[in-house]
Each structure stands twice: as C-alpha cells, then as structure tokens.
Image: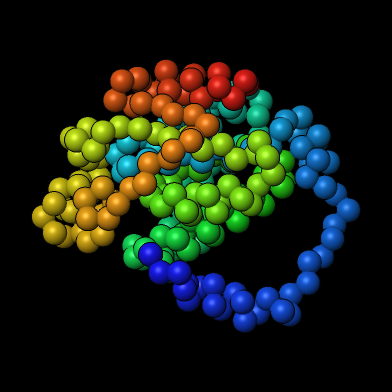
Amino acid sequence: MSDKSPYQEKANESKAHVVWHETNISKADRAKVKGQAPKCLWLTGLSGAGKSTIANALEVALTEQGKHTYLLDGDNVRHGLNKNLGMSDEDRTENIRRVSEVAKLMVDAGLIVVTAFISPFRADRDAARALFDDGEFLEVFVHAPLEECEKRDPKGLYKKARAGEIKEFTGIDSPYEAPEKAEITINTAENDIEGCVRQIIEQLGL
C-alpha cells in the first residue's frame, strides 16, 4: 500500500480554507431523544463469510427492539457514494475512509450504525476506529475459512478470481488481514444466522 494517497493530497490542498462550524445540538442530545447509546458495529471478513446477511438480520433484530439504526453495505455504497472507486489498494483505502466518515456522522446523529465491508487492511480499520469516542466503535469479525467462502461463492466471484477474470481479489491475490483484537468474533461456518445475531446482541448487552 502506498503511503501517499492522491485523495489525501487533494484534501490537504483545501484544508486550510475550511473552518469547523459549531452547532447547538450535540451527539448526546440526539442520543437522548432516541433513548440509546449510538455505536458503529463494523462487520469485517472475507467475501462470502456472511457479512451482509448477518448485518441485515442484526439490523432487523435491533429495529424490533425499538433501536434507531442504519445499515451501510459494501456493494450498495459502491453504487453511489463510492461508485468512482476501483479495487486497487489506494481505492480500497479511500472506500473505507469515506464510509468511516459517513458512519461517524450517523453515530453523531445518535444512530446505531451497522456496516458490512470486507475492509481487508488492518490499518484502514484502525483509522476508522480512531474517528470514534471510546466504546462507540466495535469491530465484529465475521469469520469463515477461505475454503468455506469459496464453496459458498454466492456471487461467483471466487470462480472468476481463480480464472483470472478478477484481479486483486481479497483472499486470492490480495491479502485479508484478520482482526487481532476484535470486540466480537462470530463463526458463520459453525453457527447459523440466528445464533450469530444472538451472540452479537448478547455481547453488546442489548
């Protein structure tokens, strides 16, 4: 990964002319209205591990509890906010940077944000965590062995990657750096969707 991002260079050029505008309503005020502690639940794992499926089921469960939530899904975000990004290391980093900033705004709005992104690089996930106050960011490692993910291959991406039709595919010819100290780890090869969601909610104390 390059230390010099073209996106960061452009940001540095304009930073000197931007001044933060203080507002009267705080994050605490917004959270109080919603009656919840805002958080970012960051689901990370290989393609096919079950991130989107678990994230969707988790949001349903939280909504049924009366929680105010929003789900940011990797593929969905690339249809809009990040549609101009490719799959190079630099673009993957920028993808996660943008999503992290959006998630931060949503937490500031008092929401419980669930994200589902491969987010393969540990440094990018650490950078995301650094945006949040203590206890607001929880890394959820959605684990399944590569062989199991390839076996599932819900979008046929592993097959294409093995055939050389997709380059820089995570787990094949681009690395996935598993979390070293995730707050929550679930194993989708050993547990069903309901069990995984229950584990997350129990560990959140909800």
Q: Position of residue 158 (x, y in %)?
A: 19, 47
Residue 135 visible in image: yes
Figure quadrant of residue 202: top right
Residue projecting furthest to the right: 24
Q: Nearer the viewer, residue 124 or 74?
A: 124
195 in relation to 24, above or below: above
Nearer the observer, 179 or 24:
179
Q: Work out whether residue 52 can be spotted.
A: no
**Horizontal side of residue 67 vs 2, given as left or right:** right
Q: Is residue 197 left or right of residue 177?
A: right
Q: Nearer the viewer, residue 120 or 30?
A: 120
Q: Is residue 2 above or below residue 35?
A: below
Image location (x, y in percent) of residue 26: 82, 47
Position of residue 34 relative to residue 129, above or below, is above
For the point 63% across and 21% down, the residue is 206
At 21% across and 59% down in the image, what residue appears?
166
Closer to us: 130 or 84: 130
Q: Quadrant of the N terminus?
A: bottom left
Q: Position of residue 86 (x, y in %)?
A: 36, 65
Q: Residue at x 30, y 52 (%)?
A: 175
Residue at 43% of width from left, 35% of height from top?
Answer: 141
